[in-house]
Amino acid sequence: MQSRLTPAELAAICSHMNDDHEDALLTYAHAFGGVDEALAARMASLDATGFDLDVDTAAGRRTVRVAFDHELADADDARHTLIRMAGAP
């Protein structure tokens, strides 16, 4: 499947996540980034295969790559995938 996400859509999703979903970003850092000590996280970039988080810890900031379990097809797929991931334990 080929992704139909445009650069503008990817940037908009990234901005939306940073502006409105700090709690989900922290969940991603803990559950998928393996950074148990994460205090805060921001989505640095997003593409059809995953995203990069800038994660703050007591020891400093580091970047973590989180891969999707499939290549995103479009913005709707991105939305559903990110919501599903935010519900992860």
Image: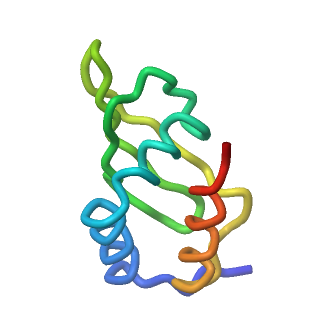
Q: Is residue 75 left or right of residue 20?
A: right
The x, y position of residue 2, in whole percent, is 67, 81
In this picture, residue 41 sits left or right of residue 4:
left
Name the image quarter holding the N terminus: bottom right
Residue sitting nearer the eye, 82 or 75: 82
Between 30 and 78, the one lying in front of the other is 30
Residue 8's x, y, as percent? Answer: 32, 82
**Where 27 falls versus 48 (above or below)?**
above
Quarter of the image with the C terminus is: top right
Q: Residue at x 55, y 56 (%)?
A: 50
Front one among 44 and 55: 55
Vertical placement of residue 55 versus 74, above or below:
above
Residue 48 sits above or below residue 34 on the image: below
Residue 7 located left or right of residue 32: left
Q: Could you say which quadrant of the image residue 57 lies in?
A: top left
Left or right: 8 as drawn, with respect to 31 = left
Q: Residue at x 49, y 26 (%)?
A: 35
Residue 31 x, y percent position in the rendering: 60, 38
- Residue 52 drawn at (x, y percent): 42, 48
| Total numbered badges shown on the rendered structure | 0
Please tell me in which quadrant of the rendered image residue 41 appears.
top left
| Residue at point 60%, 80% (across, down) | 3
x 29%, y 30%: residue? 56
